[in-house]
Amino acid sequence: MNTKSIGLTGVLLIGLATIASAKPLAGHQYLKEAKITLQQARATALHVLPGGKIVSQELERERGGSGLRYSFDIQVGHGLREVGVDAKTGKVLENSVEGPHHD
């Protein structure tokens, strides 16, 4: 096996390990009802909090907007914020400080 093959094998193994460790989206059963993709909603949430890092995400039924929203907990500096994006319109429904007992 040459150096290129070993390098490519390593990259593939790292990629497979990342996929295997990825958790499914909480609320994934609602994805067929969403008109906005998870990737679009993530981009919207990060646009609201530039430089933030999404630490958890879910698709949930909740009052307000269309009743279906993506909810993101985003680490910003030393704080945690929750951003809710309507899964049918893409509108930002929430941008608030996440309390110590977040779900």
Image (cartoon, rainbow, N blue to C red):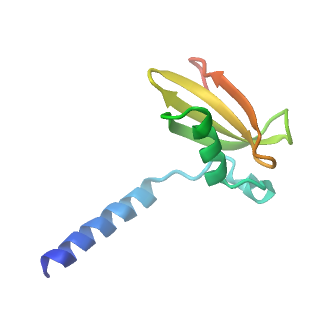
Q: Quadrant of residue 42?
A: top right
Q: Quadrant of residue 84?
A: top right
Number of marks: 0
Quadrant of the image for the N terminus?
bottom left
Quadrant of the image for the C terminus?
top right
* Residue 103 seen in render: no
30 to the left or right of 45 = right
100 to the left or right of 6 = right
Residue 48, x across and y down, in percent: 62, 34
* Residue 24 seen in render: yes
**Residue at the (81%, 49%) spot, across then down:** 88
Q: Is residue 99 above or below residue 73?
A: above
Q: Residue furthest bottom?
A: 1
In depth, the one of 9 and 27 nearer the eye is: 9
**Residue at the (65%, 51%) spot, across then down:** 40
Residue 59, x across and y down, in percent: 70, 45
